[in-house]
């Protein structure tokens, strides 16, 4: 009976966490829920987080992981400083209730992410993402076909582009490549070689994810898919041929990569034209110019407060008028820029220190774990960089990507003899 209660608690906890880290990007929730009334959706979200954290404490006790959990935090001093700074931005925010709500949700998501990194191996976490991707795909397809008015974006300027259960087609197009990568890894993984049903499911889900990305008609989503497949192909080949490769081969690959990058930059207009986009990234560059020239200098060091700037409806309309967009601008469409606006130079610097650490950990991890699963953190970090160039996916519309970064960072750095993995 005790084992069953733990399983139920863990299931509810995981369901709550994956719901809450995505909730503001879902179509049935508010992108910027009002935080000025205690009965509003913003504080109902926090209440759900408190339930999830209570379950997490219960699970830490049952799994005898409290000391391990605290050790994991002691191994992440940069993460602690960044969290504290985000919470401290309440004191200089113009709308402190918004910052309190957003910074608490961000902090709670990070607390849960550290638990996930402590509790689960990378392989087990991939299996969880596999299931989550299947649920999101199923729910999105059902909504698209059952209620096109909700599941698609009718009329100008998107003309029926699919958005599934998300607030915007670009959200769908940019999030789904994560699961495409997971499905791709499971298709070729040696861990499922003897499980025909799982391999068939992986292939089917991979195809369905590619279809939904295509109909989302998101240029950045198309580019992400291309980047992910290129990275996967190169790492897959390296895994097979690494024993035959010599330093001259790596130099040759580096030269080809640099030449390709230079060629892409010199022909950027042509390449973007293939995706029906312009070098201004659909008006983003003029908008970024205004933000960096006029908005950022007013609060350069500490920013406007965590999650604050785009929550201001008047500011969204003001940016629409200044940038010449046909509709209000809802986010900065660049993850790094939005952190700079919300937390200033200090906040962005703290974030980048954690971000660089995650990159370094992912490189060390795949050098030791020579499997497709071992490559996932590195390929995911590649995804996070490109995804946040033209959309804010660190901590603006959701904290799902941030949660994955922290989970993987903790999972890659933990000491194996101090961790109770779920195999």
Image (cartoon, rainbow, N blue to C red):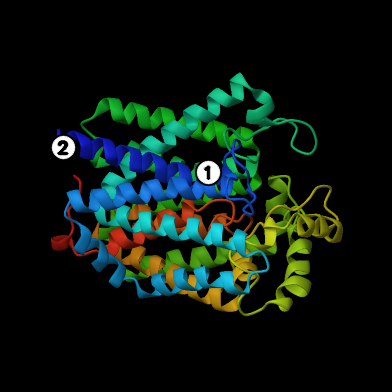
Q: Position of residue 346 (x, y in %)?
A: 55, 78
Q: Quadrant of residue 309?
A: bottom right
**Disc nearer the start of the sequence (2/1):** 2
Q: Position of residue 94 (x, y in %)?
A: 68, 68
Q: Could you tell whether 260 is left or right of 243 in the image?
A: right
Q: Position of residue 224 (x, y in %)?
A: 55, 49
Q: Nearer the viewer, residue 319 or 193?
A: 319
**Comparing labels 2 and 1, the label whose residue is closer to the camera:** 2
- Using the image, determine if residue 178 lies above or below residue 71: above
Q: Check the picture and name the quadrant holding the C terminus.
A: top left
Q: Quadrant of residue 415?
A: bottom left
Q: Nearer the viewer, residue 232 or 152?
A: 152
Q: Could you tell whether 12 is left or right of 329 in the image?
A: left
- Residue at 54%, 74% (x, y): give it: 347
- Using the image, determine if residue 48 lies above or below residue 94: above
Residue indicated by mark 1:
23
- Using the image, determine if residue 413 lies above or below residue 302: above
Q: Nearer the viewer, residue 112 or 356?
A: 112
């Amino acid at each position: 009976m005790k084992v069953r209660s733990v399983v139920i608690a863990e299931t509810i906890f995981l369901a709550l966490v994956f719901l809450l880290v995505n909730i503001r990007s879902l179509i049935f929730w508010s992108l910027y829920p009002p935080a000025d009334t205690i009965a509003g959706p913003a504080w109902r979200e926090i209440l759900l987080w408190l339930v999830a954290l209570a379950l997490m404490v219960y699970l830490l006790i049952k799994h005898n992981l409290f000391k391990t959990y605290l050790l994991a935090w002691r191994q992440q001093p940069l993460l602690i400083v960044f969290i504290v700074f985000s919470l401290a931005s309440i004191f200089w925010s113009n709308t402190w209730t918004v910052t309190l709500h957003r910074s608490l949700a961000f902090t709670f998501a990070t607390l849960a992410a550290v638990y996930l990194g402590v509790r689960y191996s990378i392989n087990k976490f991939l299996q969880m993402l596999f299931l989550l991707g299947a649920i999101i795909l199923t729910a999105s397809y059902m909504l698209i076909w059952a209620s096109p008015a909700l599941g698609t974006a009718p009329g100008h300027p998107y003309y029926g582009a699919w958005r599934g259960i998300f607030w915007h087609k670009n959200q769908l197009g940019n999030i789904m490549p994560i699961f495409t990568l997971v499905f791709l890894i499971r298709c070729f993984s040696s861990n499922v070689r003897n499980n025909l049903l799982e391999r068939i499911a992986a292939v089917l889900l991979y195809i369905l994810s590619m279809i939904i990305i295509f109909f989302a008609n998101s240029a950045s989503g198309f580019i992400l898919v291309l980047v992910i497949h290129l990275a996967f192909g190169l790492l897959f080949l390296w895994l097979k041929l690494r024993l035959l490769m010599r330093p001259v081969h790596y130099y040759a690959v580096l030269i080809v990569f640099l030449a390709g990058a230079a060629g892409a930059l010199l022909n950027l207009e042509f390449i973007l034209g293939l995706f029906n986009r312009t070098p201004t990234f659909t008006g983003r560059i003029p908008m970024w110019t205004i933000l960096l020239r006029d908005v950022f200098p007013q609060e350069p060091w500490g920013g406007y407060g965590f999650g604050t700037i785009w929550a201001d409806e008047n500011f969204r309309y003001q940016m629409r008028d200044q940038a010449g967009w046909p509709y209000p601008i809802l986010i900065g469409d660049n993850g790094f820029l939005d952190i700079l606006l919300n937390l200033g130079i200090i906040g962005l610097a703290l974030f980048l220190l954690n971000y660089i650490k995650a990159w370094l950990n992912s490189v060390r991890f795949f050098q030791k774990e020579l499997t497709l699963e071992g490559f996932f953190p590195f390929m995911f970090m590649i995804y996070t960089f490109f995804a946040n160039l033209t959309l804010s996916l660190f901590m603006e519309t959701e904290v799902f990507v941030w949660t994955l970064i922290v989970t993987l960072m903790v999972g890659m750095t933990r000491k194996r003899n101090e961790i109770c993995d779920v195999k």
